[in-house]
Amino acid sequence: MSVTFSIEGNATGAFEAECYDSAMVLKADDYDSILLAITRHKMVCEDCEYGGMYSRAILDVPADLDVNMSNVNAAMVGARLGFDMSDLSGSATGEDFLGRVLLAIAADLDDSGIRATEVTPGARGARMIDCGVAAGYFGERFGQLHALASEAVRLGREVHWA
Ligand SMILES: [Zn+2]
């Protein structure tokens, strides 16, 4: 389970689909065209014929600045940014998010790492391990979120996480 912080995106109307077996990506300007391209591809690719090939909408913002982390780590990072992370999803304006990241960086909170611990929620609960975080973890994540939020501000978009 993980949470991804990303820039709010709008659909461009175009679609893409990735081959199950290779790095090849089909692209099309509309949904009918991607369905046709997928059907054609499945005629020549056994992996996609049996494994399935699914289209996704191409958004008008880059995904390469997305920041993904485990639920536990996202809750800690979000809390340090002052967000209510109880349901691990939310949104903020780019300006608000960037301001919180800058404050978190300036606050220079303890970033010496958190040791792994075993968490056992009750006698019949599953045995769970909280993997902890390495020293410098928050600094690295705030750096990535700073890049994401700066781009969101430049584009006039929100930052979303879920
Ligand atoms: Zn394929």
Image: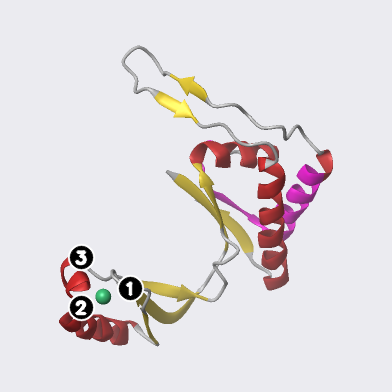
Give yes or no for residue 128 being in the magenta stretch: no
Q: Is mark 1 within 8 Å of ligand 1?
A: yes
Name the outermost residue toward the right. 106
x and y percent of residue 102 in the render? 79, 50
Q: Amino acid at mark 1?
A: Ser
x and y percent of residue 157 in the render? 64, 66
Q: Quadrant of ligand 1?
A: bottom left
Residue at 29% x, 69% y is 20
Q: Amino acid at mark 3?
A: Gly
Residue 22 - label: 1
Classified by dominant secondary structure, the portion drawn in magenta counts as helix
Q: Residues within 10 Å of mark 1 (few under 14, many from 20)?
A: few
Residue 13 is left or right of residue 116, and the answer is left
Give above or below for 155 relative to 89: below
Check disc 1 and report its element: helix, strand or loop: loop
Q: Amino acid at mark 2?
A: Cys
Which residue is the site of mark 3?
51
Residue at 67% x, 65% y is 152
Residue contact between numbered discs 2 and 3, judged by CB atoms under 8 Å? no
Q: Is mark 3 within 8 Å of ligand 1?
A: yes
Give above or below for 72 relative to 157: above
Which residue is the site of mark 2?
45
Residue nearest the viewer, comparing 100 with 145 = 145
Q: Is mark 2 within 8 Å of ligand 1?
A: yes
Q: Which comes sooner in the sequence, label 2 or label 3?
A: 2
x and y percent of residue 133 in the render? 60, 35
The region drawn magenta spans 86-105
Q: Residues within 10 Å of mark 2 (few under 14, many from 20)?
A: some
x and y percent of residue 25 in the render? 37, 78
User: What is the CA distance from the residue labelled 2 to the residue labelled 3?
Assistant: 10 Å
Give above or below for 106 relative to 119: below
